[in-house]
Amino acid sequence: MANYIALALLVLPLLQMVVTAGEPNIQDYTKRFEKKESCDLYHGSWVYDKSYPLYDSSQCSFIEVSFACQRNGRPDKLYLKYRWQPSACNLPRFDGIDFLMSLRNKKIMFIGDSLSLNQWQSLICMLHTATPHSEYKSERIGPLSTFTFTEYNVSVMLMRNAFLVDIEHKRYGRVLKLDKLGYEKTWDGIDVLIFNTWHWWRHTGREQPWDFIQEGKHLQRDMDRLAAYEEVLKTWARWVDTNVDPEKTKVFFQGISPDHSNATNWGNHNGIECKGELKPIFAPAYPRHHPAELVVEKVLRTMLKPVHLLNVTRLSQQRKDAHPSIYGLGGHYGMDCSHWCLAGVPDTWNQLLYAELISK
């Protein structure tokens, strides 16, 4: 009997080696990912991958017309075939079932503008593709949309609030309150919060949805937009530091999503914004630091509670090819070089979110 036990002890490790030598499961990816905590997931390059995209957009009916580039007649598909590859490690594979199981009975909320909508719809498609026959419930009440995977009791939510702060309607006009958050009570009790704001800070004239800016008792017609942006982020940061329990809630800030409205930035002096762009930017001199990105990083450094930055700015700056351009909401009468086609770049943002969530 002792000889049999000894033999079993010798054979068992060999059997384990054989089992784990095949295709790794999500735990294997997670362990290897955890061992490389010093790896910068956001430093890398876009590489061609014939297995991409992560889902067939025609099978995801939730995608809004603004992002449904293939449905809107975009003829090329090369932009769908690029995968983000970090320089010093690998991103863990996105496992939708693992994502749902790890967030069972929990709520995840995106708070922000239409770029948050872009990422929210991407995540819904990625999760729905992983479990296409599972029941789900979708509803919208005012600015809040909720998509629930009922089998896992996971709610993926979107709170539309382009500035994070409130816009009050007064008799003399609409007032953007830099020191008063909007809908912040809806953030309570959420397990994962992903905040975003910047896109609408650039709008002026008739496109801006406010008439005055107010901080404290100081009311003015306008001010330096980056300065106003920083004040709003400080207001938001105070709420996080005061109200968030890191043991219960993980907080993320979605980095600045860049636009590609000036083709001369990447050397195309005859280009019309991002129209007709078919490949990413591979030139090492581009991209450059985004001024709003620097403001975000400055405010995050002052915070007491941990906030994970989804630092997607520079990797997204390389993707001049991945916007709807004339294949968005306005068709050939519009030009969208701010949002992203789905499937597309926001899927990578969600892969990075997943990597951050499963890391320790």
Image (cartoon, grey):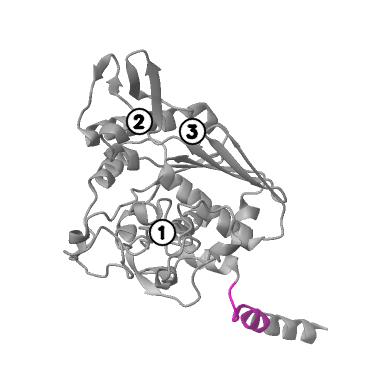
Predominant secondary structure, magenta span: helix
Q: Residue at left 50%, top 37%?
A: 159
Asked whether residue 98 appears in the rendered view, the answer is no
Numbered disc 1: secondary structure: loop
Kindly identify which residue carries mark 2.
Answer: 209
Q: Earlier in the sequence, mark 1 or mark 3?
A: 3
- Position in image of residue 273 (x %, y %): 26, 57
Q: Earlier in the sequence, mark 2 or mark 1?
A: 2
Residue 327: assigned label: 1
270 sits left or right of 144 in the view: left
Q: Earlier in the sequence, mark 2 or mark 3?
A: 2
Q: Residue 64: give x, y in percent of width and height.
A: 51, 51
Q: Which residues are magenta?
A: 14-24
Decide which of 17, 257 is in the foreground and name it.
257
Q: Is residue 262 visible?
A: yes
What residue does disc 3 label? 244
Q: Is residue 153 above or below residue 204?
A: below
How far apart marks 1 and 3 lie (CA) works out to: 40 Å
Task: Mark 2: give few (<14), some (14-19) or many (20+) Cα within 10 Å.
Answer: some
Viewer-proximal residue, 76 or 55?
76
Give the label, 2 or 3, closer to the camera. 2
Q: Quadrant of the N terminus?
A: bottom right
* Residue 23 image-quadrant placement: bottom right
Q: Is residue 177 left or right of residue 143?
A: left
